[in-house]
Image: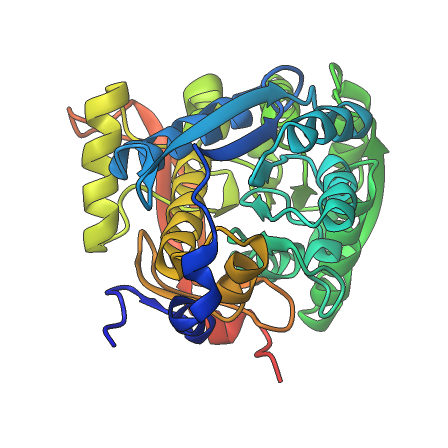
Amino acid sequence: MRIKRGIVAAAAVLAIVRPSLAAEPAPTSFRIAAIIGLSGPLAVIGADMRRGVEVALDERNRTINGVPIEITWDDSEGKPQVTVQKAASRIAAGANMVFGEIGSPATVALSGLTEQREVPLLVTFAADNALTTPGRLHWTFRTGKNVNSTVGVTAGFAERNHVRKVFGITPDYEAARDSWTLFKTLAATKGIEVVGEEFHQTPARDFSILLDKAMRSGADALYTVSQGNDAITLLKQANEVGLKEKMKLFGPGMVDEIIMRAVGPAGVDVGSTLRYHWSEDFPANKDFVARYKAKYGELPSANAGDAYDGMRWWLRVVADTHSWDKKDWVAAMTGSVITDSVEGRKDMGACDHQARQIALAGVGVEQTAPDLPKYGMKITDILQPGQIYRPCP
């Protein structure tokens, strides 16, 4: 029995040899219901996630085990209620799996629906720890990073950059508050003092009062969890008041290639975790970057790379089962390993359905190479999975 290159999944092997599979009829198509924010404050993220997934589908010639892949794209507007309503409609129409969401509140709500309906949910962006609490969810898999991993990298970044006093500005929802709470805990162990905090609704159009409080606090650094359009607004307004001249600015997922394109010099020297970076030196990544550039004429963003990698992994596992039973797909994905992802090896935790993977930290830079955009990201630190994630028992 041959094990496919790049995937080691004991459950998939068992599924291949199960006698009952021969009697299962193939569907007319494999239906993916993609529910992500294509408008609103997270639209800049959703657009690139869509691009990454489309490249993953193209790579398979939009077929799986002899049937065409059909994907629908619904705009969640970043709202939990809209997300659940649209996903429910697609599941009722026969969706084989769901891809999404972006914001953690909407993704947690979505996972409640997919668990109830017993439909696999693939998450590549939302970082809420609740999505991968050991033993909590059966049908949900996260191939992206979680809050614990991103905050751990951020705390290390603060320590290496000699931060002593920090002020926090955080969106007012659970996952963002959890991120800030964890950072405060880790900061205390590193001798970093928290001197103040403020919370904001999203979308946010004016950070001026909050930025003024941060600059008057005596902090030498500002930590923020704001993302998407909120991050763009915050960075531009921080640049207008000269915040970076007085304090460092950093946070998990704060800047990436797309944000840098939007804010330019306002993002230079801003520290951030990186979900993925086009420069990572892995064969699969080089191939992906070439495919992405050929299709879209530019380098992939972190969100595109993460979405591509997750969908590619999931579809490969499904194909290797040679089954049309969703339970077989879940069994195969649980504990699976991909050795040739765009970031090297990734292990799917059997206890929590959280992918163990490397983590990156970087800063916004002005680039001088003629084949690169004027503003982008530079990787400064690479952490191995063992430095970030707890192993499953």
Judge by depth and name the residue closer to the eye, 128 or 315.
Answer: 315
Please tell me which residue is depicted at 72% across the width and 59% down the height of the picture: 137
Quarter-wise, where is residue 117 in the image? top right
Residue 145: give x, y in percent of width and height: 55, 54
Query: Can residue 239 be seen at all in this image of the molecule?
Result: no
Between residues 146 and 63, which one lies in front from this camera angle?
Answer: 63
Spot occupied by residue 86 in the image (x, y as percentages of width and height): 71, 24
Query: Looking at the image, which is closer to me, 276 or 30?
Result: 30
Residue 57 versus residue 219 in the image, above or below: above
Which of the pair 147/238 is nearer the observer? 147
Residue drawn 52% across and 51% down?
144
Residue 77: quadrant of the picture: top right
Is 16 left or right of 138, judged from the image as shown?
left
Residue 33: image location, x then y, percent: 57, 31
Q: How is the image coloured?
A: rainbow
One can see residue 176 in this view:
yes
Image coordinates for residue 123, horizontal then vertical, percent: 58, 45
State the quadrant of the N terminus. bottom left
> Can you say whether 23 is above or below 262 in the image?
below
In this figure, what is the number of numbered marks? 0
- Image position of 321 with respect to 113: above or below: below
